[in-house]
C-alpha cells in the first residue's frame, strides 16, 4: 500500500506534510491492515527515513532531519572512479533496517541521503577493482575512498567465421596452477584477479582449434588488458 501521510511529527515537534509510506509485506497482511498493526516505511525529502512501530501511531515516531554524507572515489593514481556503487551499512531504527545506496558520478563524487547522525560503515564496489570502504564514518564529513585496481585480462575469442566459445587458459608469473575459464557463446572471456606479472594466454575450442599463445604484461600502471585471441583451424592430415 502507498499513501500520503498528512501529519508526521518531526523531531522538533513540528508537523510535516507530504511524507510517503509503503507497507511492509508480512503474513496476514489483510488482518494487520484492518487492525492497523501493519508496519509502514516512512520517507520524506530532508528527513531520515524510518520504519514505524508495529501497531504504533506514526505520529508518535518522530522523523529526524536527514544527514547527507558526501565523498569521492579515486584510484591509486588519484583518478576519479565513475559508476562505483557506494553502500552505507544498514542501520536499525528499532523496527527494521534502513540502508542508503549511491552511485558515483563522472568525477567520482557520491552523495548518500537519508542518513541519521550516527557513524556508518561504507563499502564501495566497482568491476575491475578490489572492494573498498571505510568504517565509523560520521555523516556530514567529507570522505575520500581509494580503490585498488585488480589485474584482469579479457577479450574475445574468434575463429574465421566469427566469435566462438572456447576454453581460455592463462599462466605465468604470480599464479599456479594456471587460471582457466570458458568464453561465452559470443566468445567473451575474463580472467581475474591477477597480480602484476608477465603471462601467456591461449584459447582452444571443443573442436580442437587453438590460438597461438599471446604474451601479456599486467602491471599497476596497466592492470586491465584486452587481448583478442584468434583460433586456427585444425590442420588436415593428408592420407
Image (cartoon, rainbow, N blue to C red):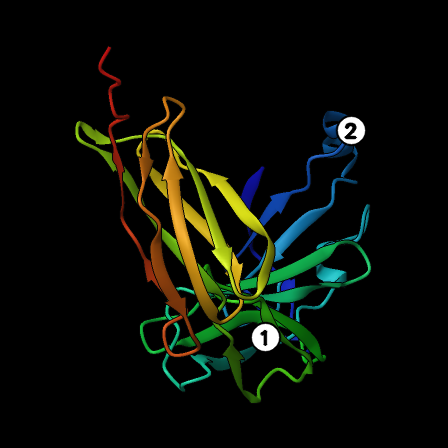
Q: Is residue 44 left or right of residue 183?
A: right
Q: Residue at x 68, y 80 (%)?
A: 117
Q: Position of residue 106 (x, y in %)?
A: 31, 72
Counting from the top left corner in percent of width and height, residue 108 is at: 39, 76
User: What residue appears at the point 49 percent right and 71 percent down from the top-left corner?
Assistant: 196
The answer to the question of whether label 2 and label 1 lie on touching residues, with beta carbons closer than 8 A, is no
Q: Nearer the viewer, residue 206 or 134?
A: 206
Question: Mark 1 highlights which residue?
Answer: 66
In the picture, which quadrant includes the N terminus?
A: top right
Q: Residues within 10 Å of mark 2 (few under 14, many from 20)?
A: few
Nearest to the observer: residue 45 or residue 149: 149
Residue drawn at (37%, 26%) of the image: 208
Q: Which residue is mark 2?
A: 27
Front residue of 153/214: it is: 214
Q: Earlier in the sequence, mark 2 or mark 1?
A: 2
10 Å crowding of disc 1: few (<14), some (14-19), many (20+): some
Q: Please, which residue is most extreme toward the left here?
A: 160
Q: Quadrant of residue 118?
A: bottom right
Check the image and report above or below for 183 versus 54: above
Residue 51 appearing in the image: no
Amino acid at each position: 500500500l502507498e499513501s500520503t501521510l498528512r501529519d508526521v511529527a518531526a523531531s522538533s515537534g513540528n508537523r510535516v506534510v507530504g511524507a510517503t509510506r509503503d507497507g511492509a509485506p508480512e503474513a496476514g497482511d489483510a488482518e494487520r491492515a484492518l487492525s492497523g498493526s501493519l508496519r509502514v516505511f516512512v520517507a520524506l525529502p530532508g528527513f531520515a527515513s524510518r520504519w514505524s512501530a508495529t501497531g504504533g501511531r506514526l505520529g508518535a515516531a518522530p522523523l529526524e532531519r536527514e544527514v547527507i554524507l558526501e565523498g569521492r572515489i579515486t584510484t591509486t593514481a588519484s583518478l576519479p572512479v565513475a559508476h562505483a556503487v557506494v553502500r552505507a551499512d544498514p542501520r536499525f531504527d528499532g523496527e527494521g533496517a534502513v540502508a542508503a545506496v549511491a552511485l558515483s558520478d563522472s568525477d567520482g563524487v557520491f552523495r548518500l541521503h537519508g542518513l541519521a547522525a550516527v557513524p556508518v560503515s561504507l563499502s564501495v564496489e566497482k568491476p575491475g577493482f578490489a572492494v573498498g570502504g571505510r568504517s565509523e564514518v560520521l555523516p556530514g564529513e567529507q570522505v575520500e575512498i581509494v580503490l585498488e585496481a585488480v589485474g584482469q585480462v579479457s577479450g574475445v575469442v574468434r575463429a574465421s567465421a566469427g566469435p566462438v566459445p572456447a576454453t581460455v587458459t592463462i599462466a605465468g608469473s604470480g599464479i599456479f596452477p594456471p587460471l582457466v575459464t570458458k568464453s561465452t557463446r559470443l566468445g567473451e572471456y575474463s580472467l581475474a584477479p591477477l597480480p602484476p606479472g608477465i603471462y601467456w594466454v591461449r584459447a582452444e575450442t571443443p573442436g580442437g582449434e587453438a590460438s597461438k599463445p599471446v604474451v601479456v604484461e599486467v602491471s599497476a600502471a596497466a592492470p586491465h588488458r584486452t587481448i583478442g585471441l584468434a583460433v586456427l583451424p585444425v590442420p588436415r592430415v593428408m592420407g
